[in-house]
Image (cartoon, helix red, strand yellow):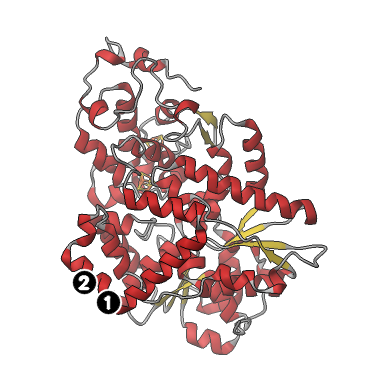
Amino acid sequence: MIRHERFAEDAPGKGRREMDSTVTTAVSSHIPSETNELYGHERADRHLGALLTDLGERNLYDAAAQCNRCGYCETVCPTYMLTGRETISARGRNQFMRMLVEGRAKNAADAEEALSTCLLCGACSTACYAKVPTPDIVLEGRRELNGYGDNFFARAAVRTLLNAPGLFAFWLKLAYLVKKTGLPRLAAKMGLYDFIGMPALAEAEGSLDRVPLRFAGEIFRKDPALSPHGKTAVNWAYFAPCGPNYVFTDVALATVRVLRRFAGEGVYIDNQCCGLIAHNYGRLEDAREFARRNIERYERLRAVFGDFPVIADCSSCAAFMKTYEQLFAGDEAWRKRAAAFAAAVRDILEFVPADKLPHADPAALEKAGRVTYHDSCRACHGQGIRKEPREALRRLAGRRYAELPESDWCCGGAGAFAFTQPELSAKVLDRKLRNIASVQASTVVVGGTSCLVQIGAGLKSAYPSARAVHYSVFLDEASGAAEKP
Ligand code: SF4
Ligand code: SF4
């Protein structure tokens, strides 16, 4: 259990129970005032047991208090740079969280705004000398917002994905079939999504123009070459994140072709969702259960084949799985197992060495035109991956490769951010599109499926001569490996 004995000490002149409680009532009604505990293992459904930071294990208050208010982060925080507002900068958010814990924050609307407008991009943590984990701090704050993660439909979707993935796939296909009829657009116009408390669904529905009716997992489960049966050794296991599995199956298929071509024999791990959606939208116990099931599948294969890397092709999911250990802070047995799994996870962006790649197929290069690379936040800030994809792209595209200005600036996709904060998201995207136009790129290579949706949609409306392509698809096409499944 983590006790925040410092709350009372830090609050000038009075104990926490005597403080102004406007915000702690409206925003943090779950904080137990008797014990001064913001979170602990008794509240494991709502909060992490501890934050595992670059400087070691910290409780929420100490992590936020690590901010010395130097302001270095303000030059890289997109929400601050675009608005000039201190309250929605990393420094402002950390300061706000500290005040919230101390009971000194007075306005629930400010709390809601500061926490819900953060992109969780992590650019601030990269720039920060004190390594303050602002995205994790913001998420902990969001989990205190009343109703956060309690929407009936979101809860039902996560629980179905967890306990009945076959049923989830069935419903998703049904939704895709309905989408093809144009009915969802009608529902949006009628305000049905507002009625069920999920207005973001209207935006989400409109941003996808292609939907698959056969999911990647279904294809891989029937592929004997990806089965563990009959194998004595494997060089990799493919983990299908929800984006490539349920939406961009072409990405999943390309990744597996690239892996086979450049890394030899492997298997499909037949995973469940990594748990990131549940984690970010307030359902921590569900996130832990997703993690446990994936860890168990990995361990079963490891018992047969020994060590092998687990490759994922969405940077958000890869980055999240690398932090599985944090989900189990306080549970030593699972924490150890989570750390072993996390150590095996690799993003496809870092996995294929450039010197293994051939020179690009000329026809594919001609089609690609000028190539540039957008750093997905969870690749560069979340995992520190910058060098490897650039080396691979330079090797393949040669002089056609151009470095993108502000390439590690968020695109504004950020999971559901584009749907929950459409105006701010559009401003962030606009800056990205201007940078893409400045290098006259025709192909923008990305490593995250959220970036694929966001940049793809932006290019389609503002710069239709260019396209967004996932890294695996580009490698597959440019190295001539794109034989059809
Ligand atoms: S978050 Fe880090 S960079 Fe930003 S003000 Fe605080 S200490 Fe400085
Ligand atoms: S995570 Fe991104 S948007 Fe949020 S405070 Fe940090 S830099 Fe700003």
Q: Which mark is residue 186?
A: 2
**Residue at which label 1 appears:** 182
Total number of numbered labels? Answer: 2
Q: In this image, 69 relative to 274: left or right? A: left
* Observer able to see residue 448: no
Judged from this view, the residue extending furthest toward the left is: 190
Q: Secondary structure at mark 1?
A: loop
Q: In this image, 332 relative to 30: left or right? A: right
* Observer able to see residue 455: yes
Residue at (47% x, 67% y) in the render = 246
Q: Residues within 10 Å of mark 2 (few under 14, many from 20)?
A: few
Residue at (27% x, 70% y) in the render = 184
The residue closer to the viewer here, 479 or 295, is: 295
Measured as percent of width and height from the top left, residue 38 is found at 39, 25
Q: Secondary structure at mark 2?
A: helix
Which image quarter: residue 116? top left
Residue at (53% x, 60% y) in the render = 241
Which amino acid, mark 2?
Leu
Measured as percent of width and height from the top left, residue 191 is found at 18, 62
Judged from this view, the residue extending furthest toward the bottom is: 363
Judged from this view, the residue extending furthest toward the top is: 13
The residue closer to the viewer here, 226 or 5, is: 226
Judged from this view, the residue extending furthest toward the right is: 232
Q: CA distance from mark 2 to mark 1?
A: 7 Å
Measured as percent of width and height from the top left, residue 468 is found at 42, 73
The residue closer to the viewer here, 73 or 459, is: 459
Which amino acid, mark 1?
Gly
Q: Residues within 10 Å of mark 1 (few under 14, many from 20)?
A: few
- Check the picture and name the quadrant holding the C terminus: bottom right
Contact? badges 2 and 1 (CB < 8 Å): yes
Measured as percent of width and height from the top left, residue 46 is found at 42, 35
